[in-house]
Amino acid sequence: MPTYRYQCECGVQFEGRNPIAKHTEPKVCPECGEKANRMLPEGIEGHFNKEVDGPGPQNTGIHGLDTHIDRVIGQSAQQGMAVIEARQKAKREFLRDNPGVDPRQLARVPDGSLAINRPEEQSFAERANRINSRAMATFRKKREGEPAQ
């Protein structure tokens, strides 16, 4: 929990801890017992990494900010995984209810449900997969410095 500085009307300055969600709430002055408002910082000191060491967010050097960013990223990842798991569950249930259907024949329709591709749609899907595979192979070769064909 971050520590903030407060300034009371009686002239006393003091520090207090508050959750980030309640950072604007006043604190009770230890001297007079009245509520004191938070002081704005006069300056901020911190160290910012200049070198990027991976795809994730970098340490800003400000603990409260880094903790908040990490929490938001964690919540986003958790929500994303929940969506993926729900889609996989729906696909397993669809395949269970439609035995003999090849999973490669499935398509997600605009409302989010699953449907079986018609033969002409399946040929388009297969062609798109082949094009994507070739494009990804070319991309990998280019990234590894090999000449693309």
Image (spheres, rainbow, N blue to C red):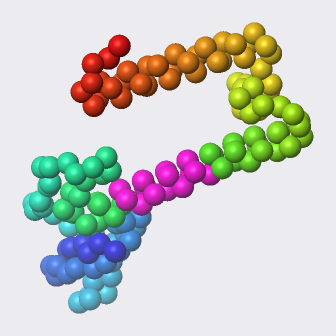
The picture quadrant where one finds residue 74 is bottom left
Please tell me whether residue 101 is drawn above or below residue 37 in the rendered image. Answer: above
Give the tally of numbered discs: 0
Whether residue 34 can be seen here: no
Q: Position of residue 129 (x, y in %)?
A: 58, 21
In this picture, residue 31 sits left or right of residue 114: left
- Foreground residue among 25 and 43: 43
Which residue is depicted at the point 49% across and 51% down? Answer: 76
The answer to whether residue 76 is left or right of residue 100 is left
Looking at the rendered image, the quarter that the C terminus falls into is: top left
**Where 126 falls versus 63 (above or below)?**
above
Q: What residue is drawn where x is 32% and y is 50%? A: 56
Q: Main secondary structure of the magenta part?
A: helix
> Which sits in the foreground, 41 or 86?
86
Task: Please say whether residue 100 is one of the residues in the magenta stretch.
Answer: no
> In the image, is 72 to the left or to the right of 146?
right
Q: Nearer the viewer, residue 71 or 57?
A: 57
| 75 within the magenta span | yes
Q: Quadrant of residue 121?
A: top right
Magenta stretch bounds:
69-82
Task: Say which quarter of the image contains residue 45.
Answer: bottom left
Residue 37 x/y as whole percent: 27, 70
Of the 4 image quadrants, the one containing the N terminus is bottom left
The picture places residue 100, in percent across and down from the top left corner, at 87, 34
Could you tell whether 124 is left or right of 11 in the image?
Answer: right
Look at 11% across and 59% down and name the residue there.
Answer: 47
Q: Residue at x 33, y 26 (%)?
A: 141
Q: Residue furthest bottom?
A: 31
